[in-house]
Image (cartoon, rainbow, N blue to C red):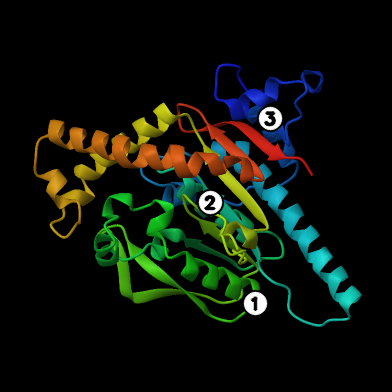
Amino acid sequence: MAEKNTNGFWRTANLSEDEGFVSPYRFFSASDWEQFRADTPLTLTESEVKRLRSMNDPISLDEVQRIYLSVSRLLYSHVEAAQRLYEQRQNFLQFEGNKTPFIIGVAGPVAVGKSTTARILKELLARWPNSPKVDLITTDGFLKPNAQLMEEGIMDKKGFPESYDVAEVLRFLSSIKAGEPRVTAPSYSHFIYDVLPDQEIAVDRPDILIFEGINVLQSRDMPREGDSIPLVSDYFDFAIYIDADEKDIERWYINRFMELRDTAFRDAGSYFHRYSQGTKEEALEVANGLWTNINLVNLKENIQPTRPRADLVLRKGKDHLVERVALRKL
């Protein structure tokens, strides 16, 4: 169970109701969580897991068995329940139409393993017995182009809520929920660190859509005129937050930056090519500055406060593997 010397969210696992606090979550150790896998079959191979994981993410087939098969089983039960509810509502309204996609949001800070989690879940969900159509979209493509960020003077806020085209995100998700065919999302290149203006990703009526990004659970300021303001998470049927200690996230971020310095950044076409030209000490100083002045600020001000809005929180330990799980009570 959760330790007493960690942050407040996980300390709630140790509070009893007679202390006047009832948590909206149930907390589990990784070993307890593993038991919920039941008879869920393992449909991935070790080589597939290696292909799906991100740089410096040590997830293995054992971790898939230990954590993600239970997550897959849980999501399967939620999708089935949503489909039954849809059928009941159709009967109630005497309405005929196609069921809407089940949307799963995956949130969490940089370098914590959101992309790996999203890709693993996509593959597991698509291999259920009924072979649902599962698509994955990240929020990177919904970032404002660099030229616009510079014009607005917020290039150093890239990744903060104000750096996204929220209206475009809402248009995309509302179209998906409406069951429209071939809904397009903008594409993004981490190599050039910018939106690709002439490329887009088409999503055509999936059974399940996984929508992954650091700020997908972000709320918004209330308007003064009383206008309605939908949130991105209003379109989610289930939300997952990938969590870890700040110091561990910092270490993973800097290690990843330094590894990229020795690999992808060496390509002259890379946006970050200049960071591969100096000394290792200079690159390390840049990585620490990017973490302290941008990513840590974003984590504390915008990302971590959204964690309690998730239905499922996966807490990683120092080894980058999940050690605790929090599931919202029904």
Q: Amino acid at mark 3?
A: Phe
In screen coordinates, is 106 left or right of 80? left
Which residue appears at 57% of the width and 68% of the height?
173
Q: Nearer the viewer, residue 180 or 306?
A: 306
Q: Amino acid at mark 2?
A: Gln
Relative to 249, residue 161 above or below = below
Tag shown at residue 218: 2
Q: Amino acid at mark 1?
A: Gly
Q: Residues within 10 Å of mark 3 (few under 14, many from 20)?
A: some
Q: Position of residue 145 (x, y in %)?
A: 31, 66
Which residue appears at 68% of the width and 25% of the height?
13
Question: SS of the residue at dot 1?
Answer: loop
Q: Name, please, the residue furthest toward the left.
A: 278
Residue 58 visible, this angle: no
Q: Position of residue 322 (x, y in %)?
A: 55, 33
Q: Residues within 10 Å of mark 2 (few under 14, many from 20)?
A: some
Occupied quadrant, residue 76: bottom right
Question: SS of the residue at dot 3?
Answer: strand
Tag shown at residue 28: 3
Relative to 102, residue 8 above or below = above
Q: Nearer the viewer, residue 24 or 183?
A: 24
In screen coordinates, is 285 left or right of 164? left
Residues at discs 1 and 2 in contact (Cβ within 8 Å): no
Q: Of callouts 3 and 2, which one flags the residue occurring earlier in the amino acid sequence?
A: 3
| Quadrant position of the N terminus in the picture | top right
Which residue appears at 82% of the width and 19% of the height?
18
Q: CA distance from mark 3 to mark 1?
A: 36 Å
